[in-house]
Image (cartoon, grey):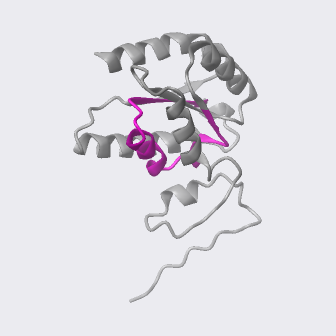
Amino acid sequence: DHQKLLTIREDRCMGCAICVGECPVKAIIYSMPGSQDLPHQMEKALSSIKGSEPALVALCCSYNAYVRSSFTRFSQAQSLPLITVPCLSKLDVSHFLRAFELGADGLLVAGCVDEECYFEGGFRWAQRRAETASSILNQVGIKDNRIELKPFSQAQFENLGQEVKAMAERLKG
C-alpha cells in the first residue's frame, strides 16, 4: 500500500478553492470571506421570500463588477433574493443541495463567462457541481432543471429578466 499525498504549492495558489470542492474526502479546508457563511445567507434569503411561488434564489459571482451591480439592481426590482459569492468556483454540491433543503424551488446562478473569469474557469467548475447536485435531487424525487447556470458578459446581461421569468414560469408549471 502506498498513500498518495497532495501538496498545495502556496506560492502558486490563486485562492480559487477549486481543490476544496473537488476533494472527494473533504480533507482540504480553505476559508475565504463570503463563502463560509453561504448557508446562513441562503437561510436569510429564503426566509425573506417565504410564501412566494416559486421560491427562487439567485447566486452571483462578486468578482465581475458589472454583473454584480446589474444583478443587484435587477434582483431588487424583482424581489429576487441575491447572494453573492467570491467566485462560482467556491460553490460546492452541498451549497446547491442546502438551498433546496431550506425550501428553494429553484436556483439561478449567474457568473462570468470563462474568458472574463478572475479564477479562469469558475463557471465550468460550478456547472460540474450543479450537475452533480441535480442528479442527487433527481434521485430523491425533485425533478430536473431546478438549477440554472447562466454565464453573463456585459452584452448578455439584458437577457436576465427573460431568463428569470422563464425559469419562474417553468417552476410554476
Q: How many marks?
A: 0
Instruction: Tell me, yes or no, if residue 41 can be seen here.
Output: yes
Decide if residue 128 is in sight here. no
Q: Tell me the quadrant of the picture where the C terminus can be found.
A: top left
At x 64%, y 62%, the residue is 30
Residue 127 within the magenta-colored segment of the rendering: no
Residue 11 x %, y %: 77, 65
Vertical relation: 22 (above or below) 41: below
Q: Position of residue 101 (x, y in %)?
A: 39, 43
Which of 18 and 47 lies nearest the eye of the viewer? 47
x, y (%) of residue 29? 60, 65
Q: Is residue 100 magenta?
A: yes
Most extreme residue toward the bottom, as rendered?
Answer: 1
Front in this rendered view, residue 21 or 59: 59
Identify the magenta region. Answer: 83-111
> Which residue is rendered at x = 52% and y = 55% of the image?
21
Decide if residue 122 is on the left or right side of residue 107.
Answer: right
Using residue 73 as the reference point, say whether residue 2 is left or right of it. left
Q: Residue at x 51, y 42 (%)?
A: 126
In-front residue for pair 49/116: 49
Q: Residue at x 26, y 32 (%)?
A: 143
Q: Residue 7 placed where, x, y %?
A: 62, 73
Q: Quadrant of the N terminus?
A: bottom left
Among the 4 quarters of the image, the one containing residue 131 = top left
- Image-quadrant location for residue 59: top right
